[in-house]
Amino acid sequence: MTTPLVSILIPAYNADTSIGETIGSALAQTWPRKEIVVVDDGSTDDTLAVARTFESSMVSVVTQTNKGAAAARNTAFSRCQGDYIQWLDADDLLSPDKITRQMRTREDGCTERTLLSCGWGYFMYRPRLAEFKPTPLWCDLSPTEWLVRKMGQNLHMQTATWLVSRQLTDAAGPWDVRLLGDDDGEYFCRVLRASDGVRFVPEAQVFYRRSGFSRLSYIGRSQRKIEAHFTSMHLHIRYLLSMEDSPRTRAACVRYLQTWLPHFYPARPDIVEKAKELAITLGGELAPPRLSWKYEWIRRLFGWDVARIAEMELRRLKWNVLRALDRSLLLFERI
């Protein structure tokens, strides 16, 4: 039998400090048949120049005007020939045997519709210190149970953990270019819905770089991202209920709405009201959003807006300090 070709697809935007390491981890994959497609999405830094230093018979680099991550992923898929698809963001890394371990697992009772996943760990600059913390998603699951756990317990799997057959990728359809964040969450809902289940491969690993407040999924106070995220949530709920409309799936949807309600409050009372109305149709009710005790006193004195800004800015400050420290320790290790 012919060894399947695996396409490693890398969308990139202003990632010149990390794209080289990411492509390197793709090239280091022990799976013998692979191709790598990098799509530069109109970067304004040296991302394209760095990526082109890797061009070869195995690595192709495409550039386009800035259209967003989802559009870049669609372009990458249109250029690939693989039997299996490995999505990889431009600042993340794969363990050398990640694809090999997953491809070997598929020979053990899997079909072309089986979705393969694995564990992932956070890191900043030093991947050897990545923290791998198992969640209830780190096991074999049916598509419905996977979504119930994701939405009901506010869990997620990092984009690069998945290995998807072309048959399953075609069945799911393209990435939704309307979504400015959580495009991966919505996309893999559709992949899951088209699959016959998830097979978890514990030995394979993905290293997920903490990019903090610059990450695509960070909503902050962006009105466009707030609206896009609520659109993604609507789609999540629709997908889950189309698979199983029951008290437990409806309860998971209500918990999902409750978890994300603070991100829309108080800036978007219209979305808050829509979320409340949606919860009622699901047989539930949303409680007023609450801040942690650290910020509740600010809310009482100065209002929600000031308290939310204080919360975001303190987190940003903490993140910047931790990132600077980790980078300094990396530079010290290299001396």
Image (tube, grey):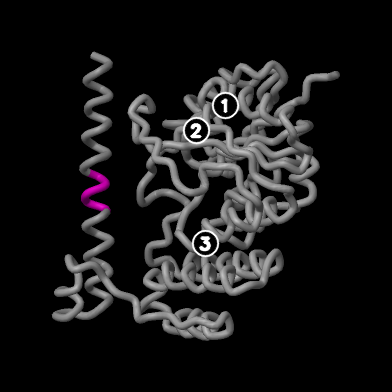
Quadrant including the C terminus: top left
Q: Secondary structure at mark 2?
A: strand
In this picture, residue 256 sits left or right of residue 304: right
Label placed on residue 151 = 3
Task: Single out the residue that lies furthest toward the top.
Answer: 335
Q: Identify residue type, mark 3.
A: Met
Q: Secondary structure at mark 3?
A: helix
Reply yes or no: does residue 317 show up in magenta.
yes
Determine which residue is flagged by label 1: 98
Determine which residue is flagged by label 2: 206
In the image, what residue occupies the spot 27% across and 76% down?
305
Q: How crowded is the residue under tag 2: few (<14 C-alpha within 10 Å), some, or many (20+)?
A: many
Residue 334 image position (x, y, % from top left)? 27, 16
Q: Secondary structure at mark 1?
A: helix
Quadrant including the N terminus: top right
45 up-or-down from 25: above or below: below
Q: Identify residue type, mark 2.
A: Val
